[in-house]
Image: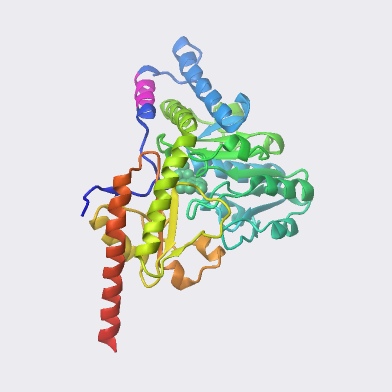
């Protein structure tokens, strides 16, 4: 065995970038005041938040006053969807492959769900048939967290503007932010959600761009009037400063990182498809996918059993959809893409990030085919024994 632990779960959370860690520690040590206060130290904390706000605004193609800091991607998504619905009512629409942070609030308010094609891209004809003037918000993610499919948001925006000119368009850019130029890809969106821990910042801090048809959203909390009364509560100053440091570095390195990591992911995918008989490249039909995600379906293998074997050999991966208990839950994304129950049972997401190395890919290529073969032998013996 090559022996290098392989952390292949960056889409769940990527390690903090040293620059973000340093910025966070520094802010925690040197900015003690409440940013809402009136004295000099409070003003310093407030200035640090506004410097960070400018970084986020630049990275996302927004104005300073359009950036709202939140406690992460989930809160940003909830604020977008429910904040618009609380203010305007009407019908909410989303795609079948969204993260639960969008899908559940939409379904909870009786919203409509748009089909996707085999590669996971939104069916634009079905979107057009679903959106009418009663619709107040459409939410389509920029890139999917399980299989990595990238959506053509300009095309989505075109349909939404034609069918429901007053509706807000929200995009969950949580997975896209480390890899894509969100400013240009989401230029047609009124609401854009990001989360720091997906691009090398800390967990528990994120942001929502609020503009255009999304501007009048209602706050989901009440309190001290922070974030232009869109998100009340004392801001996480050190987390926000670290988010900005990570985002700035991620944006600066985006092109080279996407190319380097894209090559690693391609090598991993090609190697596994060659070495694991019958393995399927889940999102092969997608016109574009994120450089960091390799999603496979391995017939005849249960994901949970495979993950246990991989962990024993220090390959850390996931089935993509996990709940707070750490248990694997059935994937609504794979179901929406047309995969049957048996195929979904053998789902494996390997996700790479800014710190991924060739050695990790080598290790995964050594461990995963052997683990699959072991599980298939075991299943064969069980079947043989029963016959
Ligand atoms: N949206 C997507 C696409 C995600 O992948 C995630 C996290 O996995 C979230 C939203 C939620 O973000 P957070 O973990 O910051 O709450």
Q: Classify residue 358 by image quadrant.
A: top left
Residue for point 35% across, 69% down: 301
Which quadrant is the C terminus positioned in?
bottom left
Q: Is residue 324 visible?
A: no
Q: Residue furthest top?
A: 40
Q: Nearer the viewer, residue 169 or 153?
A: 153
Helix, strand or loop for the magenta stretch, by majority = helix
Give the magenta part as a residue range: 22-29
Residue for point 39% across, 29% down: 20
Is 227 left or right of 160, judged from the image as shown? left
Could you say where residue 250 lies in the image, as x and y percent from the top left?
46, 33
Which quadrant is the N terminus positioned in?
bottom left
Could you say where residue 170 lies in the image, as x and y percent from the top left?
63, 44
Could you say where residue 200 lies in the image, as x and y percent from the top left?
41, 36
Residue for point 54% across, 40% down: 180
Is 321 left or right of 288, judged from the image as shown? left
Q: Is residue 28 magenta?
A: yes
Is 159 left or right of 339, judged from the image as shown? right
Q: Is residue 26 magenta?
A: yes
Q: Nearer the viewer, residue 339 or 85?
A: 339
Q: Classify residue 103 by image quadrant.
A: bottom right
Above/below status of 4 relative to 178: below
Q: Is residue 44 visible?
A: yes
Could you say where residue 9 lies in the image, as x and y percent from the top left?
37, 49
Residue for point 73% across, 54% down: 131
Q: How many marks?
A: 0
Above/below status of 231 relative to 371: above
């Amino acid at each position: 065995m090559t022996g290098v632990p392989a952390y292949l779960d960056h889409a769940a959370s990527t390690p903090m970038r040293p620059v973000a860690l340093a910025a966070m520690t520094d802010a925690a040590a040197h900015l003690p005041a409440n940013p809402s206060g009136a004295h000099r130290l409070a003003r310093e904390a407030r200035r640090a938040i506004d410097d960070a706000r400018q970084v986020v605004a630049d990275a996302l193609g927004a104005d300073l006053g359009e950036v709202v800091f939140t406690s992460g991607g989930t809160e940003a998504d909830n604020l977008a969807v429910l904040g618009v619905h609380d203010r305007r009512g009407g019908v909410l629409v989303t795609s079948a492959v969204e993260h639960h942070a969008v899908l559940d609030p939409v379904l909870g308010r009786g919203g409509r769900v748009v089909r996707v094609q085999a590669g996971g891209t939104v069916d634009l004809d079905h979107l057009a048939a679903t959106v009418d003037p009663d619709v107040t918000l459409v939410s389509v993610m920029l890139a999917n967290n399980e299989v990595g499919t990238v959506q053509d948001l300009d095309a989505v925006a075109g349909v939404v503007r034609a069918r429901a000119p007053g509706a807000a368009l929200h995009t969950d850019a949580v997975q896209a932010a480390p890899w894509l130029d969100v400013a240009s890809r989401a230029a047609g969106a009124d609401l854009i959600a990001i989360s720091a821990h997906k691009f090398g910042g800390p967990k528990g801090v994120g942001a929502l761009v609020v503009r255009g048809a999304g501007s009048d959203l209602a706050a989901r909390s009440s309190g001290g009037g922070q974030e232009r009364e869109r998100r009340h509560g004392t801001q996480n100053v050190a987390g926000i400063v670290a988010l900005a440091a990570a985002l700035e570095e991620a944006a600066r390195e985006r092109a080279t990182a996407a190319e380097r990591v894209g090559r690693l992911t391609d090598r991993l995918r090609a190697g596994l498809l060659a070495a694991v008989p019958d393995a399927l490249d889940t999102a092969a039909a997608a016109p574009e996918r994120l450089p960091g995600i390799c999603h496979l379906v391995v017939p005849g293998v249960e994901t949970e059993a495979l993950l246990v074997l991989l962990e024993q050999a220090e390959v850390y991966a996931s089935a993509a959809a996990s709940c707070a208990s750490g248990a694997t839950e059935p994937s609504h994304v794979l179901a929406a893409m047309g995969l049957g129950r048996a195929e979904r049972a053998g789902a494996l997401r390997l996700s790479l990030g800014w710190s991924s190395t060739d050695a990790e890919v080598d290790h995964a290529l050594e461990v995963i085919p052997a683990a699959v073969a072991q599980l298939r032998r075991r299943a064969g013996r069980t079947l043989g024994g029963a016959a």
